[in-house]
Image (cartoon, rainbow, N blue to C red):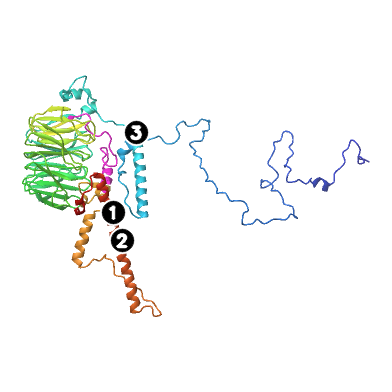
Amino acid sequence: VETAPKPGRDVPPKKDKLQTKRKKPRRYWEEETVPTTDGASPGPPCNKKNRELRPQRPKNAHILKKSRISKKPQVPKKPREWKNPESQRSLSGAQDPFPGPAPVPVEVVQKFCRIDKSRKLPRSKAKTRSRLEVAEAEEEETSIKAARSELLLAEEPGFLEGEDGEDTAKICQADIVEAVDIASAAKHFDLNLRQFGPYRLNYSRTGRHLAFGGRRGHVAALDWVTKKLMCEINVMEAVRDIRFLHSEALLAVAQNRWLHIYDNQGIELHCIRRCDRVTRLEFLPFHFLLATASETGFLTYLDVSVGKIVAALNARAGRLDVMSQNPYNAVIHLGHSNGTVSLWSPAMKEPLAKILCHRGGVRAVAVDSTGTYMATSGLDHQLKIFDLRGTYQPLSTRTLPQGAGHLAFSQRGLLVAGMGDVVNIWAGQGKASPPSLEQPYLTHRLSGPVHGLQFCPFEDVLGVGHSGGVTSMLVPGAGEPNFDGLESNPYRSRKQRQEWEVKALLEKVPAELICLDPRALAEVDVISLEQGKKERIERLGYDPEAKAPFQPKPKQKGRSSTASLVKRKRKVMDEEHRDKVRQSLQQQQQQQQQKETKAKSTGARPSALDRFVC
């Protein structure tokens, strides 16, 4: 019979079950340790929620309530300093040597800024002033963003430089075609159309399409880049001028009798008989207005979006055959036979301004894209450039051997003049500077007398219509190299053109807003406001905005007697009288101080006759 071994040295004693389950109590200052066996990885702590044990408070401890009033002196808290993440070091430990956004040159920002900061904000209510300040801040931020994005404009304007001492006017078109690439050389071409000339031409706003019309009824429109013909018709009537409307899908033709509208397939859409015997056409793209000048001396504005005539103005200067538009403010410039140029707006029946330019009749007028300079030529064989920024004074004058019959400005400020069968081009120092008339930039001789001139937008191309047809010349540096894809996109599809047309109609500017200074629209016309107030008072017989007489409120308990009402009225009248007397005394004191300062500034000795001077 086997017996259980007795506890001895070699055999460990058996432990009681309760004794094995009992653990040593652990205090809050002791760390929890988990025994691990060899070869086993330590696991998570035994606590199920895996959270630290909070120190336990003794049960008999007395809890002191905190008083709401602090005994310590309160120190104002420092504002939390937000750390700039850009200034912190990267993972590699290197620090950015150029932290923050790159600085933008002030000259580039001013180029895109549209707010004149030299003019102080008017004294107005706090709410209005805060809105103006917010608008200024947004405009400044927008101009900075536009200046930064200018780096993304990859194209640069072209130029033409001769060798040492070489005159660029002696460089002919054949030499330029040989020097440029194949795509640019294809933009130079001649259309021999002698049997239907002379021709007037016009480029679309995108610069992709060309329309021209001959004196003998030939009308055509084409994509001049790909040389794809859109339409070609003969109206069997003399064509005096031709213009694209807001897109290349519509075409306005001034025929011998009436004004006709065609589509890009050559189908006649409208015949406007109220515009008869039209000699010149101009289209205002942001107002959707077609301006026509006629032999009868009338300037007519036609709204092509609704098909109504907005205004018909009588210039009272005889036949009108010289007309141009200012792209900056949409003002029409008319040249007259008495040597004056008048500026017109559909909102006024009289000219906005009249400028005496030449001793003889005016033959041609052109305004640059910034609306700063105007070029005129007259029968006195003089070519003048005027400043349109309020002075209307000639900046430069040049006498030509033969008077210029046609003038045109490019987007970059180049000036072209057609004199007989010769075309001269003058260039300036930049886009914002007037062209220098001392030495021509380019010269070209055509096969017939010039009848129409226009630079192609966004291309270094000059289109010339003459008696022998149409010529496309290469003029380096004439066009703007970068275009706005949302406004004038030469590569837009049909769907994009339709969407742009809807957006342009929604953003159409009313014809009443055409004025000399577009910035004046944001100001208050005080003179017109006072005049309208006077007319309203005369019409009604009283001033509706006048201050009503004081009427005391009725009171109870016998305090609304007749004597008390009269006394209260008299008290208010006395207060108003005191205010008027106080204001008059202040004005007298100011006048006296002004007289004393004038007397001190002159430094003359006082005389007894000074008392008689008012």
- Residue 499 sits above or below residue 176 on the image: below
**What label does residue 48 carry, if any?**
none
The residue lying furthest to the front in this view is: 608
- Residues at marks 2 and 3, CA–CA distance in whole angstroms: 62 Å
Q: Is residue 488 found inside the magenta-colored segment of the image?
A: yes
What range is drawn magenta here?
Answer: 473-502
Residue 392: x and y in percent read 16, 41
Choose the circle earlier in sequence order: 3 or 1: 3
Q: Nearer the viewer, residue 132 or 158?
A: 132
Quadrant assignment, res 24: top right
Q: Residues within 10 Å of mark 3 (few under 14, many from 20)?
A: few
Q: How far is disc 3 from disc 1 in space, using C-alphas?
A: 56 Å
Task: Give the amino acid type for the residue marked by disc 1 in the picture.
Answer: Gln
Q: Nearer the viewer, mark 3 or mark 1?
A: 1
Q: Which residue is mark 1?
A: 590
Secondary structure state at the residue bearing disc 3: helix
Front residue of this view, candidates 372 and 486: 372
Picture layout, residue 226 above or below residue 162: below
Q: Quadrant of residue 415?
A: top left
Tell me the mark number nearer the camera, choosing from 2 and 3.
2
Amino acid tagged 2: Arg
| Res. 477 visible in picture | yes
Mark 2, residues whose alpha carbon is within 10 Å: few (<14), some, or many (≥20)? Answer: few
